[in-house]
Image (spheres, rainbow, N blue to C red):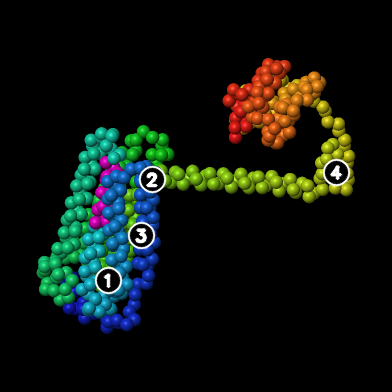
Amino acid sequence: MRYVPPEVLLSFPTPNYDDPVTRGHALLVVNSIFVALTVVVVCMRMYTRIYLKRWFGVDDVFILLALVFTLGLTAAVLLANRNFGWDRHIYDIPLTQIEPTLKIGMAAKVLFVAAASFTRLSLLSLYYRLVYNARIRGYIWAIHANTAFTVAIFIAFVFLAVFLCTPVKNYWMFGSPPNTCLDEGIATMFAGVTNCIADLACTVVPIPLVARLEMPFRQRVAIIFLFSLGFIVTIAGIVRTWFVYKALILEYDTTWYSYPLWIAAAVEIDIGVICASAPVLKPLLSKISLNLSAISSRLSSLRSGYGSRSGGLTSRSNGTRSDGGTTLQGTNATTSKTRPERRTEVTPNVEPNLNDIPIELNQWEDVERGRKHLSQAESCQANLGSNSENSSVEHGILDRGRPMSRISEDDHRTQIARVMTQSSDGISPISPSSPRGFNRFYAR
């Protein structure tokens, strides 16, 4: 536990455990909003990688680990804020809550370092994929150095947060002997400055590489902008470091002045995860943009169609009527009769290509031709005085829609084949061997 001089303890006012002054609900609101955005963005990233790209990489594993530690940090901070007085003055916290408050504080530091480190490792894994095929040795070594630096500070700061005091329990014990703990303010300030440097390095490294890529200028600028979002994380880290300096070095009212510190920490971690996922979301955002464009076009076409119909109704309601060559409008009706010109169009007698017509139309055309030729056959037989009861013309398909009931189907097909072979044009479009002919029509 941080050592507080006796004169500072005597300067504290009388504790108010029943109705203390609090900081409000800003910590709860900010953490809830940003962690919800972070979860949504990471879910969108997983959907893009798994369902759209059909690929899952090491950077996705690191970002999932970062999300887990971010959720743990948010839960720890909100729990301490609600149950252990992180939103009030330190002298308004009962002595029984000092130990759990400091334990949660140690856990929150470890969770913060882990979340920040895995976010950087996710970005660095993405950079490795970008430069792997390019074989640019300078950038590869820069990413190597950045990765080694990130892993080193991760291990060092976790070790420093856990073993700040010797033994470890002296960190949360009230009245622990002096000179058993390192200066928490100096150690946390050093960690904050180092984190800012690491964030800045992760942001700057890919920008020169993207600037050299052979792609359209607008696309290159868009990618640089996405990577430049990391500067927001660096700025949030600088703000958090300032509150660390104020809460742990300048002031002894640690809980009261650490309140904005944890808000800045939440913003830094959550925006870091969001910025690390933003470059991966391009396929999903493109798909959403195309769908929105299609919906907008459909709505525009519907509105234009409705407008044209309403325009026609408006002109009719104004008293305008057109009937043939006579036009009546309002009270001053004018009659103009014009005789329409007659145009005679000669249509060539071209036999259609049956292969270009759907099978249903071919079948219907074959049946109509069959009926025509059978009508001709009926006329011929009537002239010859043929009154045979087995005539296929009398009991065939002349009665449209009536099924064949008096003759067999084989005799009927034979009659049709004989009539068609005797037709004037010599073409048998519904012969029994025709693949689109009468046989298939009756075989249904």
**Residue 328 badge:** 4
* For marks 2 and 3 on the same chain, the one whose residue lies earlier in the sequence: 3
**Residue 51 badge:** 2
For marks 1 and 4, give the CA distance.
87 Å
> In the rendered image, which residue does mark 1 sit on?
255
Q: Is the residue marked by circle 1 packed among few (<14), some (14-19), or many (20+) residues within 10 Å?
A: many
For marks 2 and 3, give the CA distance.
24 Å
Q: Position of residue 72 (x, y in %)?
A: 28, 62
Q: Is the residue marked by circle 3 packed among few (<14), some (14-19), or many (20+) residues within 10 Å?
A: many
Identify the main secondary structure in magenta: helix
Left or right, residue 5 beside residue 126: left
Quarter holding the C terminus?
Answer: top right
Is residue 314 positioned above or below 430 on the image? below
Picture quadrant of residue 185: bottom left
Label 2 residue SS: helix
Q: Position of residue 31 (x, y in %)?
A: 35, 63
Left or right, residue 385 beside residue 158: right
Q: Amino acid at mark 4?
A: Leu
> In the rendered image, which residue does mark 3 sit on?
35
Magenta range: 114-128
Question: Is 106 a magenta residue?
Answer: no
Of labels 2 and 1, the one closer to you: 2
Q: Amino acid at mark 3?
A: Val
* For marks 4 and 3 on the same chain, the one whose residue lies earlier in the sequence: 3
Q: Tags 4 and 2 in contact by the CB under 8 Å rule?
A: no
